[in-house]
Structures are given as structure tokens and as C-alpha cells.
Image (cartoon, helix red, strand yellow):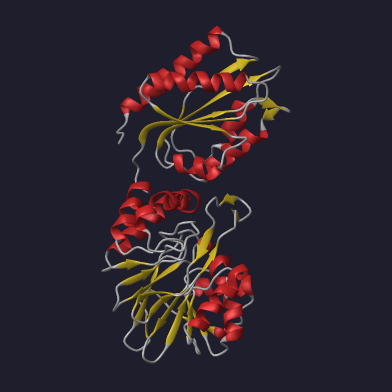
């Protein structure tokens, strides 16, 4: 990706990973991703904010060459994860006079993960400043979005916040200021990366709101010239608010659980509840994670197989639990042949779930009249519960 000017002396020099389709060998990237890095040139010193994933390091060096950057004094490392910090050892090789500026915890992680030697670091603390000559960098700790060491760098004179992953979005685009299309990639990113840390998101949001911010320049995706857009979206996603929506995420071996899922879907729709319906064998888990941001209820559908829950259903249950959704109600619809085990597995997986587990619907084999009555009972339960809480 080409160099883009943000303000006088402030440039985007990052990389776009157009064809990356998986992050952490787990998270789907249907639209690719980007690793934003920024050069800030003061009258005395030059700083690079974050590096890039090593797979795209040539793009960073191409941009630094285009910008004729002969010397980098400081590499600001806001976050030790390799998609931003992995390029730092390459930068230090190319610019041997550069020092890595970060907090103590991030330094320790960079030494462990990337073997950067101790004498390459300048350690800063909360509120510390570095003067580049007419451009002053100030540092704020924003822990647990989504690692413990994460910090944000604020460029005082230009009122730009560089918060690394916080406010990021996984999207590969040359239109880095395209705020019009920010919502879905940012929501997907929030759902996959930030949602397990909802309380930390809220705390850090309050903290950065106190700054006078004109531009938010994260290290993934869109750069915001209207910071309110992404800050308001984060406030909504991290709130306790849920919507009159239910998720049905199911896997079915011989159509019994599928029939139950279809019946429940229609029963919920008839009761005025919007349904997100996922066949887990073909579902992008990012889509499922996004619905967990808003839906009041999660229904997992999975049969018993091999004396436990079907592994595809178990994977979804494990993942949903790990994401710590704010979903208020959950239940199970399941079918079995000779011994039911899925409901036990669900309880053992939902250790983080703070809401109420509604009585499941369990069918022996293909669902019959009484099972359909039970599915209507579950739909009635969900409707009643939704009416009892504040929905938006
Ligand atoms: Fe984009 Fe947590 O790294």
C-alpha cells in the first residue's frame, strides 16, 4: 500500500495483507486485513508507530524508502503481538540507531517473543512524553484490549490517537479513510478480538474519551477523521444492551436436530423475535460472533454422538463461552439415538455464561408431536424472558 499523508509530518506507511484469510489460525478474514504503521516526523526526531506483520515487511520498507526516511529514532511499540511487533527486528536491522519505546510489560513480552535485546529499549510509563521537535508523543496504558501490555500513543499537537488494535477492523482496502463502510468490519473485529474484554473496553473507552481527539489511527483497517463514529459504536457494543434477537446455531447428522432448528426458528419469528440462523458446518464463526454482540438469546442445536455433544456443536459452544457474550439466555435443542449427553456437555462448557439457561428440548430420534410442543414451550419461554428485560 502506498504512503498516505494524514497531516503534515504524519504519514501512513503500513501494509495491506490482501489475501490473508485466517488470523491466529482461528479467525476468518473474509476481507483480508491490514497492519497500519505510521511515521511521525518532528524537526529533531522521527518515530515509527508500530511495525507490520513480517509477512508484509517489504511493503513497510518500500514506503519508508518512498518517504525518504533515512533515520528512525524511535519505534513506538503499542502492542507486542506479532502482527504489529513482528516487523520490529527487521526495522532495527535496517535502522540500527533506532530505540524501541514501550512500557515495561510490553518490553518484557517483546524480549520473550521476538528476542529483542534489553539495550534496544526505552521504557516509558503512563503520561510520559517524548518530544520529536514540534510533535509530542504521549503514552497511555489501555490494558486488555486485548493483551495486558497494550498502550495508546497520542500525538498532542495534531490530536491523533494511535491505539493499535483498539478501534481496529480487519479489512484490506486502499481506501483507509472510508468511514462510510466502517461498521461491519469494525464490528466483526470487535466481536472476534475485543468482546471477551468488554469491561476493559468500557474502561479504556472512558479513558481515551478525556483526550481531545480529531483522528483515530488504529493499526488495523479504517482511519477515523470522525472519531465519534467508532467510539459510539464501541460504547454500544460494550454496553449491557441486547436486542429482541435469538441465535440458532446448529449441526445435524440425520436431519432430526435440523427439523427442530427449523421449527423453533419459525416459532420465534411468529412471536416477533428476529432470528439469526446458522448451520455450523458452513458458518463463518466471525458472523456468529457478531450476532453474539446483540442477541438476547443463544440456542445451540447439536445431537449426541460418541457419548458426547457433536464436536462441531461442542466447538461452537466452547467458542461462544470463550467470547463471554452478554447474551442473557441460552438453551439447547438436541436429538439422540440411545443415550443423551449433549445437555451435560453444554453445562460443562458454559462456565463463563452469566445468563439463564432455559430448559432444553431433547428429542429421541426424529422430533415428534410432543417435541414440537416442547419447542413451542421454549419459544414461549424466550418470548416471556425477552419481555422481562430491557431490550433495545
Ligand atoms: Fe493486531 Fe493484537 O494484534
- Based on the displayed image, in which of its 4 quarters is residue 167 positioned? bottom left
Q: Is residue 81 visible?
A: no
Point out the residue furthest to the top here.
369
Residue 121 lies, in percent from the top left, at: 53, 83
Point out the residue furthest to the bottom here.
44
In this rendering, would 43 be left or right of 27?
left
Residue 74 lies, in percent from the top left, at: 47, 84
Residue 30 lies, in percent from the top left, at: 55, 50
Q: Is residue 135 visible?
A: yes
- Based on the displayed image, in which of its 4 quarters is residue 366 positioned? top right
Q: Nearer the viewer, residue 346 or 32?
A: 32
Q: Nearer the viewer, residue 133 or 31?
A: 31
**Residue under the point 55% across and 52% down:** 29
In this rendering, would 283 be left or right of 229?
right
Residue 261 in the image: above or below residue 99: above
**Residue under the point 51% across and 63% down:** 34
**Residue under the point 56% across and 60% down:** 18
- Based on the displayed image, in which of its 4 quarters is residue 346 positioned? top right
Point out the residue furthest to the right here.
306
The C terminus: image quadrant: top left
Amino acid at each position: 500500500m502506498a504512503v498516505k499523508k494524514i497531516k503534515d509530518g504524519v504519514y501512513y506507511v503500513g501494509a495491506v495483507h490482501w489475501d490473508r484469510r485466517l488470523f491466529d489460525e482461528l479467525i476468518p478474514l473474509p476481507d483480508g486485513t491490514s497492519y497500519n504503521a505510521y511515521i511521525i516526523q518532528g524537526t529533531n526526531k522521527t518515530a515509527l508507530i508500530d511495525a507490520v506483520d513480517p509477512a508484509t515487511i517489504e511493503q513497510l520498507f518500500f514506503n519508508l524508502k518512498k518517504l525518504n526516511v533515512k533515520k528512525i529514532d524511535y519505534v513506538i511499540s503499542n502492542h507486542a503481538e506479532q502482527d504489529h511487533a513482528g516487523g520490529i527486528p527487521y526495522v532495527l536491522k535496517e535502522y540500527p540507531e533506532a530505540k524501541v519505546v514501550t512500557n515495561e510489560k510490553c518490553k518484557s513480552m517483546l524480549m520473550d517473543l521476538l528476542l529483542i535485546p534489553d539495550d534496544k529499549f526505552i521504557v516509558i510509563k503512563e503520561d510520559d512524553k517524548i518530544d520529536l521537535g514540534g510533535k509530542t508523543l504521549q503514552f497511555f496504558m489501555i490494558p486488555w484490549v486485548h493483551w495486558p501490555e497494550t498502550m495508546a500513543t497520542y500525538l498532542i499537537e495534531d490530536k491523533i490517537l494511535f491505539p493499535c488494535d483498539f478501534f481496529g477492523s480487519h479489512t484490506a482496502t486502499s481506501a483507509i479513510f472510508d468511514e462510510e463502510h466502517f461498521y461491519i468490519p469494525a464490528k466483526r473485529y470487535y466481536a472476534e478480538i475485543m468482546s471477551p474484554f468488554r469491561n476493559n473496553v468500557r474502561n479504556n473507552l472512558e479513558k481515551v474519551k478525556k483526550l481531545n481527539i480529531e483522528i483515530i489511527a488504529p493499526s488495523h483497517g479504517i482511519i477515523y477523521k470522525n472519531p465519534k463514529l467508532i467510539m459510539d459504536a464501541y460504547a454500544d457494543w460494550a454496553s449491557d444492551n441486547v436486542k429482541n434477537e435469538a441465535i440458532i446455531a446448529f449441526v445435524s447428522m440425520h436431519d432430526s436436530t435440523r427439523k427442530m432448528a427449523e421449527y423453533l426458528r419459525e416459532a420465534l419469528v411468529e412471536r416477533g423475535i428476529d432470528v439469526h440462523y446458522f448451520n455450523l458446518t458452513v458458518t463463518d464463526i466471525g458472523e456468529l460472533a457478531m450476532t453474539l454482540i446483540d442477541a438476547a438469546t443463544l440456542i445451540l442445536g447439536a445431537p449426541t454422538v460418541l457419548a458426547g455433544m457433536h464436536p462441531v456443536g461442542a466447538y461452537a459452544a466452547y467458542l461462544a463461552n470463550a467470547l463471554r457474550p452478554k447474551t442473557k439466555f441460552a438453551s439447547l435443542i438436541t436429538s439422540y439415538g440411545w443415550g443423551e449427553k449433549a445437555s451435560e456437555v453444554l453445562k460443562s462448557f458454559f462456565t463463563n455464561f452469566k445468563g439463564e439457561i432455559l430448559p432444553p428440548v431433547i428429542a429421541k430420534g426424529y422430533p415428534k408431536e410432543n417435541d414440537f410442543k416442547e419447542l413451542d414451550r421454549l419459544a414461549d419461554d424466550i418470548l416471556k424472558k425477552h419481555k422481562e428485560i430491557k431490550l433495545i
